[in-house]
Image (spheres, helix red, strand yellow):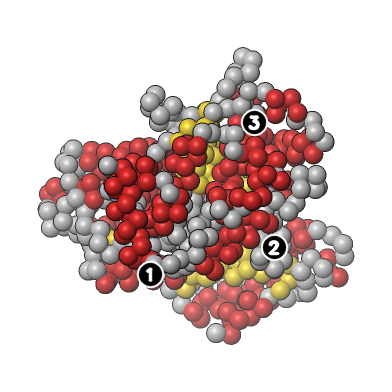
Amino acid sequence: MAALSGKIIQNAFLAQHRPQARHSTRYPSDFCALDTRSVHSFQERRLRLAGTSAKWLNTISTAWISSSKQAYISCNAAQGSSVVSSSAKVDFLKLQNGSDIRGVAVGGVEGEPVNLTEPVTEAIASAFAAWLLNKKKADGWRRLRISVGHDSRISAHKLQDAVTLGITTAGHDVLQFGLASTPAMFNSTLTEDEINHLPVDGAIMITASHLPYNRNGLKFFTSAGGLNKADIKDILERASRIYEDSSHGSTQELEQASKGEVSNVDYMSIYASDLVKAVRKSAGNKEKPLEGLHIVVDAGNGAGGFFVVIPLLPYLHYLFLSNAPFLVLELMLFLDQDKVLKPLGAITTGSQFLEPDGMFPNHIPNPEDKTAMKAITQAVADNKADLGIIFDTDVDRSAAVDSSGRELNRNRLIALMSAIVLEEVFVRLVLCSICLSVAHLFYDKGGKHHRFKRGYKNVIDEAIRLNTIGEESHLAMETSGHGALKENHWLDDGAYLMVKLLNKLAAARILNPNVGSKVLTDLVEGLEEASVTVEIRLKIDQNHADLKGGSFRDYGEAVLKHLENSISKDEHLCKAPKNYEGVRVSGYGGWFLLRLSLHDPVLPLNIEAPSKDDAIKLGLAVLTAVSEFPALDITALNKFLQQ
């Protein structure tokens, strides 16, 4: 039967694709780099991680079609990823990006050398296992279980293998989830499922969010949530030592020790099932509470396609080339099944870019991106849909579009989520530093607004802190689309945010089966929105003589201090009495915030104003102050003022 199904699929593939390049798989480590395995000890050891069937299952669950040009990039990426030998000096701390790790994993982009290599990634994974073991404070050494998942990036598979090797070489077990979302990885530390070896002790997500195809990174979770900046620094320092020891042959004892085991788990089906249960529960356990609603999803070729269905077609090419027909039936059962919306009764025709593609050929998978929002808005209009949903690459952010084409992102999404939560419980709302325009709506609905510095981890940590001192908080959001709820373990989960919207729709349809997305937009009626919202990045030239050998941070702080002094002399402007970062100023019916980036020589300037004229007045106030700093590139600000 399996062989017959395999034959049918092969014929279907041949009928549609005819001759294709044999190297058009997305994952070069299984085709392009086969000849190099014998000469790289890293690749040799990789083959001992799991049995053949486990390897094939994982490979199939994460492979997808690419064009010849994309395959060429992928093959070069595989062959060039280990150019930096394990004896080369690596500055691990430069890989830190706040509470994440990010680097360049694929070569070919001028000025961006590969620094997140397989040996580096292996060392980081080993360091996380050591950190986690210490965190668990186990009596003596014990074996840990760590889940590993990734988004759709072309470097995902090789980094997954490196992470797996780093953990198993240290003697711990790995659960490979394959293509997964960031929120699902955290949930795997909480899910009780003995059959699938859950919960795990820790989780690693391989992702770089919406960054370009050549980037990648790592996010880490325990049952307490995502790691903080201090934890990441600790792990990177450990990784640096492991990497150095490895280059001097000091890990020989670890190589001879018993290695951990690798299991493959279809965790996304478990995670999706929980989302379905949540919507059904909100609708009084009705089996299909969204029946008749037309909802289109734009996954941006990231990991969010599961919200509709994981399509089979993109995998046919790999199945044919792999010559593994015995896996076809099992694969069909895994892939060709409805995940979230269809089981709830929704119509999903017109959903787009569901297939994973790490080159992101259609648009940047980012709810803040205008092109991305235009794409989902157009899909809603073309299909006369009731609602549109869009996710970023790893599904920790999301946005929506109503039936009239009104975007529910940024301030509107914050206002909508706040209104939904305020219907359930009286809360203090914790928001980022640039979303003051929604505060009045919160007050009208009985909530409290607590402004804090931007950065999703910052607002989440602040919400948790407020709860510990008796100030009840249930929602933490920022305008980028990150949003976390107390009821969901303070996890910034884009899929869960959309489930909250679906819950509202499902509950409303019990009373009126004909209700559509207007029930959502009615909740934010009267929201005061700025006509002009802009972010301008002012770069600091670190080679400029005006820095006089100093750091860009010192220079940036000097710019902010000078701006603060200048503002105090302008009667039309008023500095915020309490601010957590940079200089925030109100005036001309709007406001601006100039702050210093955490890691880059950049001063981002955010402006919100009721009109272009008012925005220009605010911009001119900034320009007057910062023009005295020649190392600051004000080209972008001048361009905005001259439009």
Q: Give the alpha-carbon distance from disc 1 to disc 2, as whole Å.
A: 30 Å
Q: Nearer the viewer, residue 105 or 199?
A: 105
Q: Is residue 150 left or right of residue 119?
A: left
Marks 3 & 1, CB-CB < 8 Å contact: no
What number is the disc on residue 375? 1
Residue shown at the point (61%, 27%) measured from the top left: 259
Q: Give the alpha-carbon distance from disc 3 to disc 2, as whole Å.
A: 30 Å
The answer to whether residue 431 is seen in the rendering is no
Give the class, few, some or many, for how many residues have Cα within 10 Å of label 1's Cα (few <14, many ≥20): some
Secondary structure at numbered mark 2: loop
Q: In this view, does 404 lie above or below 482?
A: below
Residue ID for mark 2:
112
Q: In the image, residue 198 lies at what x, y percent? A: 43, 28
Q: In the image, residue 64 lies at what x, y percent? A: 45, 56
Give the class, few, some or many, for how many residues have Cα within 10 Å of label 3's Cα (few <14, many ≥20): many
Amino acid type, label 2: Glu
Residue ID for mark 3:
169
Q: Which of 127 and 619 is in front in this view?
A: 127
Q: In the image, residue 303 lies at what x, y percent? A: 43, 52
Amino acid type, label 3: Thr
Residue shown at the point (52%, 67%) measured from the top left: 68
The mark closer to the camera, 3 or 2, is 3
The answer to whether residue 295 is seen in the rendering is yes
Secondary structure at numbered mark 1: helix
Residue shown at the point (38%, 55%) measured from the top left: 316
Marks 3 & 2, CB-CB < 8 Å contact: no
Secondary structure at numbered mark 3: helix
Marks 1 & 2, CB-CB < 8 Å contact: no
Which one is earlier in the sequence, the residue at label 3 or at label 2? 2
Which one is earlier in the sequence, the residue at label 1 or at label 2? 2
